[in-house]
Image: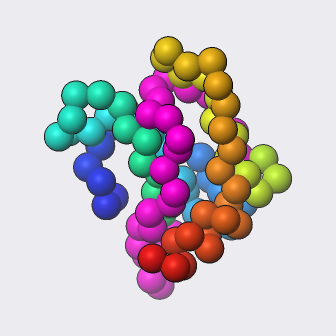
Amino acid sequence: MNTAQYGWWGCVMSGGQYAVLSGMGYASSGPMSSCEALTLGENTHWESLPPMHDTRTEFAYAAVAGCIIVAGGQNHQSAEVLDEMMAAVAAASV
């Protein structure tokens, strides 16, 4: 991964990539908002995805219809959606 972390949550995206969401940073004492995707194959690599709006831990998530929905978490009563297509565009422009 590009960012060293532990305690992350992950799911398979519609394109077959494995998304890693949030986690706890080794260099910090709290939850992170970073998101990354692992692509396997001839060119195995990690791509940064747009970060979540909030840092979260202990949240629910699901990959549905080209989106990753993240809801709740410790001290959160909100939800957010990561559009896989927009994430791919953002990753390609970096």
Between residues 54 and 22, which one lies in front from this camera angle? 54
**Residue 6 horizontal side relative to residue 43, left or right:** left
Residue at the far right: name it. Answer: 65
Residue at the far left: name it. Answer: 27
Residue at the far front: name it. Answer: 53
- For the stretch drawn in magenta, the main secondary structure is loop
- Residue 79: x %, y % from top left: 67, 31
From this view, report whether residue 83 is shown above or below residue 6. Answer: below
Give the residue drawn at x 52%, y 44%. 52
Give the residue drawn at x 49%, y 23%. 58
Q: In the rendered structure, which segment of residues is drawn in magenta?
A: 39-63
Question: Which quadrant of the view contains residue 6?
Answer: top left
**Residue 51 horizontal side relative to residue 24, left or right:** right
From this view, report whether residue 80 is shown above or below residue 13. Answer: above
Question: Which quadrant of the view contains residue 48?
Answer: bottom left
**Residue 80 horizontal side relative to residue 21, left or right:** right
Q: Is residue 64 magenta?
A: no
Give the residue drawn at x 67%, y 65%. 86
Give the residue drawn at x 56%, y 70%. 90
Determine if residue 20 is in view: no
Q: Where does the N terminus fall, quadrant-wise?
A: bottom left
Q: Where does the C terminus fall, quadrant-wise?
A: bottom left
Q: Is residue 61 magenta?
A: yes
- Residue 18: x %, y % from top left: 54, 57
Determine if residue 34 is in view: yes
- Residue 8: x %, y % from top left: 42, 38
From this view, report whether residue 9 is shown above or below residue 82. Answer: above
